[in-house]
Image (cartoon, rainbow, N blue to C red):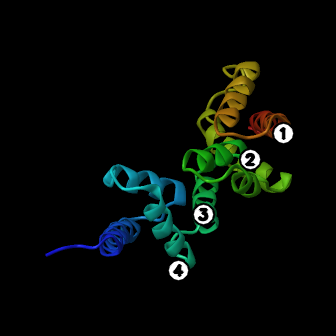
């Protein structure tokens, strides 16, 4: 059976599309990551066919970086991550820098609330210790490191840590 050039390209398009749909059926992903996956699976294929498949999948709203960013952002926020960590997570997943910036921007009070929740949970382990046993300077440093590692902004970290250390001291004084 002889294949013409157009038939071969159409067959490649369908094979790439089928594999892309299979991949998308298992997980939500970005255009960038799907491109890398398809290039790895079809190393001899020219980029124009892969781009055509990706364009078609975007038309059908099967690949949507905005939707993926929204899902990942909600997940990272639920896990207590700050704006910088969210931005880096999106960039690592192949989301465009402008989209990552858009999704990592949040009101300061929302960021402070999440940071407060994280620190309150962290400080629970120190509630049973007597005030004499707690070195507030070291505790302040630990809290600051914890929030910085989670990607919170420095000004948010300073306000939250100051308030939480004061609250911890008041709780222990009243005990």
Label disc, if present, on residue 174 of the rendered structure: none
Which circle's residue, 3 or 2, is located before the other in the chain?
A: 3
Report the front residue among 153 and 42: 42
Left or right of residue 48: residue 165: right
Q: Position of residue 144 (x, y in %)?
A: 73, 30
Q: Name the outermost residue toward the bottom.
A: 60
| Element type at mark 1 | helix
Q: CA distance from mark 1 to mark 2?
A: 9 Å
Seen at 42% across and 64% down, the residue is 27
The reply to whether callout 1 and callout 2 are in contact (CB within 8 Å) is yes
Q: Position of residue 50 (x, y in %)?
A: 44, 62
Q: CA distance from mark 1 to mark 4?
A: 49 Å
- Tell me if label 1 and label 4 are in contact, CB under 8 Å: no
Question: In this figure, which residue is indicated by the disc labeled 1?
Answer: 163
Q: Earlier in the sequence, mark 4 or mark 2?
A: 4
Numbered mark located on residue 65 in the image: 3
Asked if residue 56 lies left or right of residue 17, the reply is right
- Residue annotated with mark 4: 60
* Tags 1 and 3 touching, CB below 8 Å: no
What residue lies at 28% left-to-right and 73% top-to-bottom?
A: 4
Q: Position of residue 115 (x, y in %)?
A: 73, 46
Gap between marks 3 and 2, in whole Å?
30 Å
Q: Closer to us: mark 4 or mark 2?
A: 4
Left or right: residue 50 versus residue 94 is left
Q: Label 3, secondary structure: give it.
A: helix
Q: Which residue is mark 2?
A: 116
Q: How far across and down, in percent of the image, does residue 31 sit?
A: 53, 60
- Which element is circle 4 on? loop
Report crowding for label 1: few under 14, some 14 to 19, many 20 or more residues within 10 A (C-alpha): few
| Image quadrant assignment for residue 9 | bottom left
Q: In this rendered view, identify the residue nearer to me: 98 or 102.
A: 98
């Amino acid at each position: 059976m002889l294949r013409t050039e157009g038939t071969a390209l159409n067959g490649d398009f369908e094979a790439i599309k089928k594999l892309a749909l299979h991949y998308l059926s298992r997980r939500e992903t970005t255009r960038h990551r799907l491109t890398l996956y398809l290039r790895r699976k079809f190393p001899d294929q020219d980029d124009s066919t892969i781009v055509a498949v990706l364009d078609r999948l975007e038309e059908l709203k099967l690949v949507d970086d905005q939707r993926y960013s929204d899902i990942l952002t909600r997940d990272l926020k639920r896990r207590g991550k700050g704006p910088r960590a969210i931005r880096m997570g999106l960039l690592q997943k192949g989301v465009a820098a402008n989209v990552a910036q858009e999704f990592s921007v949040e009101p300061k009070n929302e960021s402070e609330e999440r940071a407060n929740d994280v620190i309150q949970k962290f400080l629970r382990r120190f509630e049973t210790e007597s005030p004499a046993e707690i070195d507030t300077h070291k505790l302040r440093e630990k809290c600051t490191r914890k929030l910085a590692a989670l990607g919170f902004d420095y000004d948010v970290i300073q306000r939250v840590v100051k308030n939480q250390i004061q609250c911890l001291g008041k709780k222990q004084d009243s005990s």
